[in-house]
Image (tube, coloured by chain):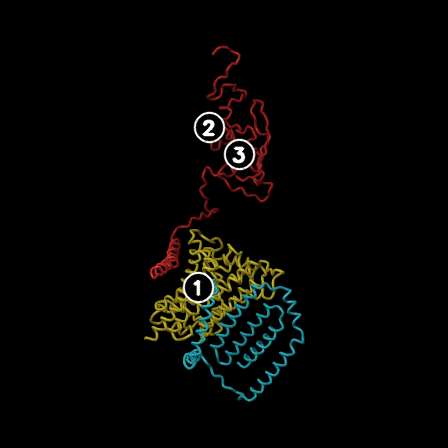
Chain colours: A yellow, B red, C cyan
């Protein structure tokens, strides 16, 4: 089997790499956060603490996997599986390099939006089935936040789609041969960045799981591997948003020829992952109503104006 | 109205965008700042001499126990972790027959050190005193008593105090006036 | 593809039936989501990927999230489940069953007249958009004005 789009080897490699990268991000995030807070972070297990992930995994796998007796068992069990599934499915349409990818879909962007909107169910069911006040509050917040920010996410993407004339992510990358879309679509990029943070509910928009106010939000009652799936799912979401930004705005695998395309892709995505971690280190969490009014009163008009201007410019050319 | 709107937009951009960027840059710069962490078991931190750690009982410069079993430390102790019993030597000195500190209760507040009139009980900068068995946290006099003077090198209670012991009569202490003979009429 | 179509169709029918008979409302909603996703798969198989994805985004992803959102706030417990069980007697199904049977007969009648092997034509995003902004542009604009009115009124209500 060769390394081409859709071959079994490629699919296996992508799946394995993505999951391993997401797991390693637990260590990367802790290390980077500590550097930004003038600490050292986990550096005990293995060289530079690299095996910390292994230690964490052993801990999570051997923990008691407890389902509370008052929980709605079916929803409680499928909720963490949903988030892992939808995010891993989203990776199917990401073009990692000219010859690396799972499918070459004509509705790639829409597929990712659909998967992102299905991801909201994981959080909502997790909170609802836990039968716990904090979990319910967390999932209420999560539902409103994810549904709202999906809107701006979709609208901010449309500028890119209009410029490249396709929903196919591979075509979008190829359309950035001359100029990365971050230049003509800078506003769209900023909106997508913010909406991406809100969609993957990472800090500063981790309002659904705000530890200081509502325990751990929707995964308050989760333990063991189910919690681990939520945890890794969050990092998978981070990887997904980073690679999406790379694909949509920063030319995907494009780069000077001295490095192979996949390395360029990984480098660009890595920069965004680090940026998301920097966001976590630097910016405090906004209040819930501030998040909502910021989205609907500022980002929505801004993204609509951006789309309007993009359309006008395309038509005038 | 127009002006107010412009000012509102300006403050919006300044507050929501610029301040966030400034914060991000400020935190990012920390990447190039050396970490404050002291990697403790590999690297011993500098302990200040006044650190309140493990409690010791010191001796005076002559090598005698400083503790006079006055019980002030036991009274001052807020968690009642000090227990001692007074004994008396043939030369008139008081000393503790036993002196017991329960370190599983001790909160290292240092009140005993402040209460001590003879500088006998002192807190040291040592903090590595974890044990596996709880009973091992109870330290007896032979564990507590050191052979040095601790922080006060030339203080000797019996040499400056008026207390009479054999070999040092009333009025023979340092800076002590001779006892006044109350029955004498002479000035 | 044919197998996929029948599989998705079966799932859609079973899930929709389960929505009706399920007494736990959260589970009923989950079945409804499943049914909608199965319909999306049918759309995809029939050559309408755009419609399929929109089904997933709009119906499964947004509208049912709002349903679930409302249910979360209602604090439903065992007593509503019992109430639901009390209503779901055999007699209730009689009238809807008869009406559905009539509709099914009509549908079968129509289907029997349709040419059996319809060629599947793939309708991509381009074709849909060309139609929406070509012949149907008036309808699209009217719908967008309606949505705008909805947006403005929602904003007005939320502001108070």
From the image, tell me which residue sits under label 2. B154
Q: Mark 1 lies on which chain?
A: A
How far across and down, in percent of the image, does residue C38 sit? 54, 75
Question: Which residue is pictured at 45% across the width and 37% down the height?
Answer: B49
From the image, tell me which residue sits under label 3. B112
Viewer-side residue, A133 vs A160:
A133
As helix, strand or loop, the secondary structure at mark 3 comes to helix
Viewer-side residue, A215 vs B110:
A215
Left/right of residue B169 with respect to residue A73 in the rendered view: left
Instruction: Judge whether residue A275 can be spotted in this image.
Output: yes
Q: Which chain carries label 3?
A: B
Q: As displayed, is residue C96 above or below residue B12? A: below
Label 2 close to label 3 by CB (< 8 Å): no
Q: Mark 2 lies on which chain?
A: B
Viewer-side residue, B153 vs A103:
A103
Which label lies toward us, 3 or 1?
Answer: 1
Tell me where residue C92 sits by quadrant: bottom right
As helix, strand or loop, the secondary structure at mark 1 comes to helix
Q: As displayed, is residue A49 above or below residue B93? A: below
Distance from the alpha carbon under mark 3 to that under mark 1: 60 Å
As helix, strand or loop, the secondary structure at mark 2 comes to loop
How far across and down, in percent of the image, does residue A160 sit? 39, 71
Label 1 close to label 2 by CB (< 8 Å): no
- Nearer the N terminus, badge 2 or badge 3? 3
Question: Which residue is pictured at 49% across the width and 26% down the height?
Answer: B156
Q: As displayed, is residue A34 above or below residue A165? A: above
Left/right of residue A150 with respect to residue B79 in the rendered view: left
From the image, tell me which residue sits under label 1. A295
Viewer-side residue, C160 vs A140:
C160
């Amino acid at each position: 089997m060769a390394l081409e789009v859709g071959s079994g080897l490629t699919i296996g490699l992508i799946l394995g790499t993505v999951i391993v990268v997401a797991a390693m991000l637990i260590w990367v995030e802790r290390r980077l956060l500590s550097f930004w807070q003038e600490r050292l972070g986990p550096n005990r297990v293995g060289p530079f603490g690299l095996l910390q992930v292994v230690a964490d995994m052993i801990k999570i796998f051997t923990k008691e996997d407890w389902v509370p007796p008052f929980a709605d068992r079916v929803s409680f069990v499928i909720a963490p599986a949903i988030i892992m599934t939808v995010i891993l499915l989203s990776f199917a349409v990401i073009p990692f390099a000219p010859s690396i990818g799972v499918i070459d879909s004509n509705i790639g962007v829409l597929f990712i939006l659909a998967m992102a909107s299905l991801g909201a169910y994981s959080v909502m069911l997790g909170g609802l089935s836990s039968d716990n006040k904090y979990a319910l509050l967390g999932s209420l917040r999560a539902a409103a936040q994810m549904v709202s920010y999906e809107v701006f996410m979709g609208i901010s993407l449309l500028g890119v789609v209009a410029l490249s004339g396709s929903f196919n992510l591979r075509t979008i990358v190829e359309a950035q041969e001359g100029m990365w879309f971050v230049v003509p679509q800078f506003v769209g990029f900023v909106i997508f960045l913010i909406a991406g943070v809100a969609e993957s509910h990472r800090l500063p928009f981790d309002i659904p799981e705000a530890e200081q106010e509502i325990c751990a939000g929707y995964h308050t009652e989760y333990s063991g591997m189910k919690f681990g799936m939520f945890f890794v799912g969050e990092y998978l979401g981070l990887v997904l948003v980073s690679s999406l930004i790379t694909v949509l705005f920063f030319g995907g695998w494009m780069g000077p020829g001295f490095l192979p395309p996949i390395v360029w892709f990984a480098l660009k995505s890595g920069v965004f992952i680090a940026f998301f971690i920097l966001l976590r280190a630097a910016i405090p969490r906004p209040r819930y109503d501030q998040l909502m009014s910021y989205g609907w009163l500022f980002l929505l008009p801004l993204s609509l104006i951006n789309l309007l201007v993009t359309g006008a410019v395309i038509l005038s050319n | 109205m127009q002006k107010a709107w412009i000012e509102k937009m300006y403050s919006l951009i300044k507050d929501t965008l610029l301040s966030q960027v400034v914060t991000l840059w400020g935190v990012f710069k920390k990447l190039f700042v050396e970490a404050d962490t002291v990697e403790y078991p590999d690297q011993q931190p500098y302990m200040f001499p006044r650190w309140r750690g493990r409690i010791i009982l010191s001796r005076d410069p002559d090598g005698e126990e400083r503790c006079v079993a006055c019980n002030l430390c036991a009274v001052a102790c807020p968690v009642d972790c000090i227990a001692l019993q007074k004994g008396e030597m043939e030369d008139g000195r008081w000393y503790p027959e036993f002196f017991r500190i329960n370190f599983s209760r001790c909160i290292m507040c240092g009140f005993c050190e402040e209460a001590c009139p003879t500088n006998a009980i002192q807190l040291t900068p040592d903090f590595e005193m974890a044990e596996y068995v709880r009973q091992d946290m109870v330290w007896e006099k032979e564990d507590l008593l050191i052979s040095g003077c601790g922080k006060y090198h030339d203080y000797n209670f019996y040499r400056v105090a008026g207390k009479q012991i054999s070999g040092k009569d009333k009025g023979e202490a340092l800076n002590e006036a001779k006892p006044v003979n109350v029955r004498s009429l002479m000035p | 593809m044919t197998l996929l179509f029948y599989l998705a169709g079966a799932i859609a029918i079973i899930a929709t039936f389960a929505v009706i008979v399920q007494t736990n409302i959260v589970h009923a909603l989950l079945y409804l989501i499943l049914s909608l996703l199965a319909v999306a798969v049918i759309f995809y198989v029939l050559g309408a990927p755009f419609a399929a994805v929109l089904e997933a985004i709009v119906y499964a992803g947004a509208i049912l999230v709002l349903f679930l959102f409302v249910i979360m706030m209602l604090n439903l417990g065992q007593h509503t489940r019992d109430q639901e069980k009390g209503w779901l007697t055999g007699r209730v199904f009689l009238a809807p069953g008869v009406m559905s049977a009539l509709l099914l007969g009509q549908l079968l009648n129509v289907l029997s007249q349709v040419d059996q092997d319809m060629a599947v034509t793939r309708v991509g995003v381009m074709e849909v958009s060309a139609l929406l902004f070509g012949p149907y542009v008036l309808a699209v604009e009217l719908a967008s004005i309606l949505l705008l009115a909805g947006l403005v009124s929602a904003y007005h209500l939320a502001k108070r």
